[in-house]
Amino acid sequence: MEPSPEAARPPAPPDLDYRLRQQAILSEFGVEALRGTDVDHLLQRAAELCAQGMGAEFCKALEYQRGADTLLVRAGVGWGPDVIGQARIGADLASPAGFALKTGRPVISNHLADETRFRTPQLMADHGIRRAINVLIENRDGAFGVLEVDDTREGMFEEADIAFMQGFANLLGGAIERQRTESLLRAALARQDLLAREMSHRVKNSLAIVASLLALQARAAEDPAVQMALADARSRVEAIASVHDQLWRQGDKDGDKAAGEGEGVPGELDLAPFLEKLVANLASGVPGQRLACTACPQRISADRAIPIGLLVNELVTNALKYAYPPESHPGGGEIRIRAERQPGSLVVEVADDGIGLPAEFEIGRNSKSLGMRVVGSLTRQLGGSLTIPARGKGACFRLEVPLDG
């Protein structure tokens, strides 16, 4: 019986096993570096795995403090309790880590007591360190610091160990750069969101002034038709102001969420409270009517919220005027507004149980009503469809707007 190829293969030399184990450890850390979001955790894990991979007693990650020209022990293993986050060593050429930092080259010293290139820092002398190996941690922003492995025992760090440690240093440098970039991006987005909300707040205030002026003009007008036209214009302006008010107010809430959950998106609002606020404003002007709003939570952009709000405003205003004439419905009636998410679209309905629509009723460019022409224009702007489902009594307008994703 012939031996299998595996059995015939000679055992791997001890050095090869050692290097293969190092590669496995480095690969493990590479996954963590890609996913990690905490620099201190990554530095600590790098120190732990580096020491493990080299069978060393000590390892430390040093961060360069440019103002003081020192290296802070940011993370490490094997050191006393007062070292991590507190101890500093000189970043000059007179220390192994400083030599690596300033020259940009790896440093191996297997006999620190006999070194002539640099002195042994007090921290290392206090711990009895006899040999050390250092590599630079850097990225496009420059040198972050140094990764150093130390040991009190006799032995030899080799050139191949530099490749292992440099792999850790390169992964750390990339992860630190990525996290710094992400932090700057988050700050820029927060700033953009703040500016957008501030602008919405100012636009809302300006539109409120316009609405007040229209109200004053309507009260001063003697012609009822002019009064009605000005009241309609005021209602439309208030609908737009309501969108900007919600953008401002919901933006504040989303800012709080972003700090803990990251759910807020600049320039978006939740349709449900927006429609509820809009309907409440319309209901306050007609105490004899009953308005009911049912809307599911759905985040949409302001570019969509404004035309949807204006369209609902027009349809509800139209129902308030014509659905329940006093002569046939002295007690008024109910107007229902509903919004719900369906697969691929948003559906908004405005319905009543009134007298229904006249036979010649039209929506769009051919309508005699300015409000219905506005409704047709808003529907086209949204890229949606507006239908009037058949009903036993009353009227129902059904708007369907496609949603991305």
Image (cartoon, rainbow, N blue to C red):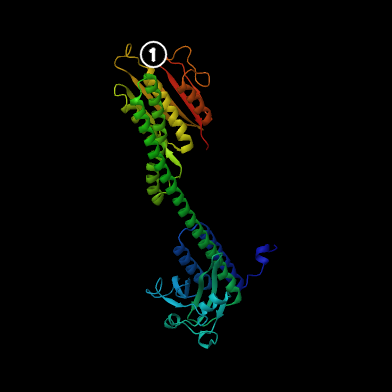
Q: Position of residue 135 (x, y in %)?
A: 55, 73
Q: Position of residue 307 (x, y in %)?
A: 47, 31
Q: In x, y percent, where is residue 5?
A: 68, 63
Outermost residue, right direction?
Answer: 2
The amino acid type of the residue labelled 1 equals Ile
> As displayed, is residue 170 above or below residue 220?
below
Kindly indicate the quadrant of the structure image that contains residue 88: bottom left
Snapshot quadrant of residue 283? top left
Answer whether residue 297 is visible to the viewer in this image: no
Q: Would residue 144 be seen by someone viewing this image from the given angle?
A: yes
Direction from residue 329 to residue 51 in the image, left or right: right
Assign the N terminus to one quadrant of the image: bottom right
| Placement of 319 over or under 215, stated as above or below | above
**Mark 1 Cα within 10 Å, few/some/many (few <14, many 20+)?**
some
Element on which disc 1 rests: loop
User: Which percent across, then down, holds residue 116?
Assistant: 54, 87
Pick whichever, 279 or 33, lies toward us.
279
In this rendered view, identify the residue nearer to me: 296 or 108.
Answer: 296
Report how many numbered discs are placed on residues in the image: 1
User: In this picture, is 325 found above or below 55?
Assistant: above
* 342 lies left or right of 330: right
Q: Which residue is mark 1?
A: 355
